DNA sequence: CACTATTTTGCGGGTTTATGCACAATTGCG
DNA sequence: CGCAATTGTGCATAAACCCGCAAAATAGTG
């Protein structure tokens, strides 16, 4: 990995999360502590970031124009994202839906990961496209205004052409008896196609959506292999899903 | 292998992967390290790439990806965008490429316009999706890191399925004798398909790209119906293009 | 075709850069 | 205060860079 590339990534991370820990970075980028420290130093000298003990802070507060992207439950979604990326190995084909949780996962992908990501979500695709080493495949069709995703028969057909290793879906509602449900028919059809085209299905959701229902059913619990929330796997709220045979992370 | 050929290949690689390592290149092309380094140096002097220790980076990588720098020549592009939207009428099917100029056009669309926009550019699609009344169709395929567009045979095939009224292309180089040219083979193929699938082709560019050339030819001047720059239509710089039968706006 | 001029390429040096490691000094938190 | 984490410094090493030069390829010319 080139030095400039690395520093650009660091800058990106800092501006994204407002702060960054040196240890996190050197684990993520897979270089020595010293290198990271030197990078932070250089960036700080150029005024791009503000270096502090143990890491660095964004300077965008002082520069003027900054608006913290108000992602709902951002911290929780970062926890979920970190758990999710641990499932992805080099060389995998990964189908994903959209939503803020998926975007968060995209940002948390280790820089040296080499895999192929397939999605119809414009926002997710843009995040994937920023990653230096992964291949990105866009699913095309009519774009839904609300979800910013390609949805329709053409996209569904395209999804079916792939047989991916993993499928990550941000879900809106999960219930022990009714399974996964959602409120947009077109999105649901896309999700169903993705589930069918993958060896394993991973559902991501913040815990407040646990035990809730939406009008349209996506799939049964038995179709879900792994469920990731921000809670520890042994949390009592999740017990019914463990009993249903789902792996909790 | 010819020097020119080699440099075109390098440029392609850089734009495709956003970066390139000198070692990789000299192994792949089978020339000495020094030759590659000299090539990179020349390309860097021309401003086509950014040279760094160990290889080179795409300049779009630097400009567009991590640091959301202000759009280059933003004011000019807004002028161009205003002119461009005046061509679009209710009910039209419009094919567009990507780039900052196209995104600017997307933002300039009147709110009551009802039309259908088709594109492979993720950033352009996102802008279109914000509009309340237009239909948006995404072209899917492998996503190019540099241009953030879907490019490849699948996308080209999809484009050919449409017969649109207008095609808007942001262009990188136009010359009175050599026509339109660009530096990324895959993007060029996509642009060609779009031109063929449209009744009228509209090229958008800031005036500083007038009378410049890039390695790969997109099309002849005769394939262009309308050329939009920020200059008035009767500006002397544009005269050769008016003489070639192009409508200037 | 022979001959020259120019460009391009590869190679051998000495120099610079990038990175990791060791170790001591410093920081900051409980 | 004690202790672990973080930092600064010096050093080693491998890789990448610069420079000049000569061989090879290319182009031009009478």
Image (tube, coloured by chain):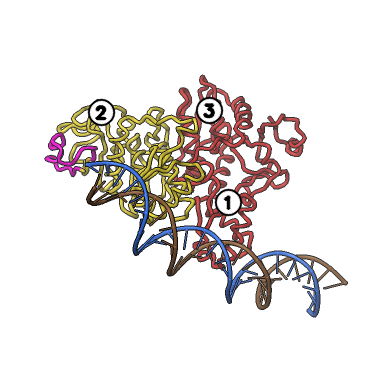
Chain colours: A yellow, B red, C blue, D brown
Q: Are marks 2 and 1 in contact (CB under 8 Å)?
A: no
Across and down, in percent, residue B8 comes to 60, 56
Quarter residue B138 falls in: top left
Q: Are marks 3 and 1 on the same chain?
A: yes
* Residue topped by disc 3: B107
Answer few, some or many: residues within 10 Å of disc 3's Cα (few below 14, many 20 plus, some between 14 and 19): some
Which residue in the structure is indicated by mark 2? Answer: A216
How far apart marks 3 and 2 lie (CA) works out to: 34 Å
Q: Which residue occupies 51% across, 56% down?
A: B20
Residue B141 belongs to magenta span: no
Residue segment shown in magenta: A228-248
**Circle 3 or circle 1, nearest the eye:** 1
User: Residue B76 in the image: x percent, y percent?
Assistant: 64, 31
| Figure check: A214 above or below A97 | above
| The label number, if any, that marks residue B49 in the structure image | 1
Please report, as a chain letter, where disc 1 is located: B
Does residue A117 appear left or right of residue B204 in this picture? left
- Image mark 2: chain: A
Is the C-beta separation of discs 3 and 1 under 8 Å? no
Report helix, strand or loop for mark 3: helix
């Amino acid at each position: 990995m080139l030095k400039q590339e690395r520093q650009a990534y660091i800058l990106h991370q800092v501006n994204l999360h407002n702060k960054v820990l040196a240890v996190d970075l050197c684990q993520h980028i897979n270089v020595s502590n010293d290198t990271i420290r030197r990078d932070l130093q250089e960036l700080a000298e150029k005024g791009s970031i503000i270096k502090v003990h143990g890491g660095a802070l964004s300077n965008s507060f002082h520069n003027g124009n900054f608006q913290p992207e108000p992602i709902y439950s951002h911290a929780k979604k970062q926890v979920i994202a970190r758990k999710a990326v641990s499932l992805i190995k080099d060389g995998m084909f990964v189908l994903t839906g959209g939503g803020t949780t998926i975007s968060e996962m995209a940002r948390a992908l280790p820089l040296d990961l080499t895999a192929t990501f397939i999605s119809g979500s414009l926002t997710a695709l843009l995040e994937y496209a920023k990653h230096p080493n992964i291949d990105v495949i866009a699913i095309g069709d009519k774009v839904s205004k609300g979800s910013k995703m390609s949805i329709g028969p053409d996209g569904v057909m395209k999804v079916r052409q792939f047989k991916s290793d993993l499928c990550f879906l941000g879900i809106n509602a999960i219930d022990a008896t009714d399974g996964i449900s959602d409120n947009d028919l077109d999105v649901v059809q896309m999700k169903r196609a993705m589930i069918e085209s993958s060896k394993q299905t991973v559902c991501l959701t913040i815990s407040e959506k646990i035990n809730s229902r939406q009008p349209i059913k996506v799939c049964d619990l038995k179709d879900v292999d792994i469920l990731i929330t921000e809670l520890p796997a042994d949390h009592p709220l999740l017990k019914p899903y463990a009993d249903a045979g789902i792996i909790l992370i």
